[in-house]
Structures are given as structure tokens and as C-alpha cells.
Image (cartoon, coloured by chain):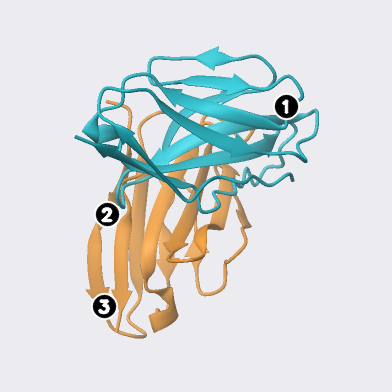
Amino acid sequence: DAKTTQPPSMDCAEGRAANLPCNHSTISGNEYVYWYRQIHSQGPQYIIHGLKNNETNEMASLIITEDRKSSTLILPHATLRDTAVYYCIVRPTDQTGANNLFFGTGTRLTIIP
Amino acid sequence: EAQVTQNPRYLITVTGKKLTVTCSQNMNHEYMSWYRQDPGLGLRQIYYSMNVEVTDKGDVPEGYKVSRKEKRNFPLILESPSPNQTSLYFCASSTTYRTGELFFGEGSRLTVL
């Protein structure tokens, strides 16, 4: 499976858009990009996923470059509750029954009041 | 409310005293799994279950047992806990193993003395 590279930490001012980058240069054509976050020591929370096209839901937007080698998660109006560790995960479409997600070390996002 | 419920949330126990961490989901999900999270090692899959009566080992199964007698429940059993099983444990579920959209429980922090 392709692995991902994320900056270890980022800050963002409250109310501004938070843009979290992820590099997945070895991604293959049948692999999705998933984003999760973990607030303090709570259970990870699914945010969004995509294959080729940009995606948007009520939580965030996901922008995937045309060559699919990188992506950006956008939280449009960050609040203090968005302070968390954000994980970018690559997952094959033909995942085995284990469905084992590799969370890596993620990006620790801190929202500054 | 759709949720994955784990109990206990916190437990301090002693070496060798058998314990069970329960996990229950109310979403009629086929797939369930257990992860442990340790500093510097991220989340690692312990066991998973694709459906009732179907379980298999993840990456770190040693010292653990599971069962899946009912669709909603997936207990994690530590027959003889040891200090190296001190960790933060998460149960997760999804509709099937084919989706990467997992729902996680709030976590169970276990300390083995």
C-alpha cells in the first residue's frame, strides 16, 4: 500500500480556513485517499474520502491533484473544536477483509483563538 | 444515535487477571475490529471480524482473543494480561469490510500493573 507524508504540526487562526496537505506520491490507480481526525484521545473520526475528483461534505473539502500524488484537506472555517490530529490514509479499493487502515503519525492541527 | 460503545472506559488491573473489554454497535454493521494505540507506534489492528462467527488476526494478536457470536457485539478478551498490554484500545465498525468509513468507539484505557 502507498504510504503518506504529512507535516507533523500546523497552526491556524480561528475562523480561517485550515489547509492540511498530504503527499502520497506512490499512490496507485485503485487507491482512495481517506481523512480521519482524532481529538485528544478520543476514537478517530472519519471526515471524507475521494478517488480522483474533489469532494465536499458538511465537515470539509478534499482537493486531490490531477496526478493524484498529493491532496489537501480544507476545513473552511476552523473552530477551536477542530484542534486534533489529522490522518491522511491511502486505502485500496479492493481492500482485503482485514480492512486495516494505516494511520501513521498525522498532522497535529492547533486552532489559535 | 448511531454509536460504538466500549466498556470499561478506564481500567487498572494486575498481571494475570483475566479481563474482557466489551464492544457493541447499533448500526447493524457486518465488519468490526479492534485497534490498540501506543505512543510512537500509532494505531495497530489486533483482530477483525467480517461477520458473525468470522474472525481473524490483525497485526498484533498475541495475548488477545475475540469472539463474534452476535452481529452487534465484538468483545476483546485478555486471558492473562501483562504490562505490555497497557494501552489505549479502540473498537471500530463499518457496514462491510469494503468501505474505509469506520466508526470508532470512545476508547478503553487499560493499565496492567
| Residue name at image x 44 percent, y 14 percent | A57
Give the residue number, with chain letter if any, for mark 3: B13
The answer to the question of whether label 3 and label 2 lie on touching residues, with beta carbons closer than 8 A, is: no
Q: CA distance from mark 2 to mark 1?
A: 40 Å
Image disc number at residue B7: 2
Marks 1 and 3 belong to one chain: no
Q: Amino acid at mark 3?
A: Thr
Q: Is residue B72 visible?
A: no
Chain B visual colour: orange
Query: Which structural element holds mark 1?
Result: loop
Q: Chain of mark 3?
A: B
Figure quadrant of residue A84: top left
User: Please, what is the three-letter code of the amino acid marked with disc 1?
Assistant: Arg
| The one of B44 and A48 positioned closer to us in this rendering | A48
Q: Which is more toward the observer, A50 or B101?
A: A50
Instruction: Name the chain under label 2.
Output: B
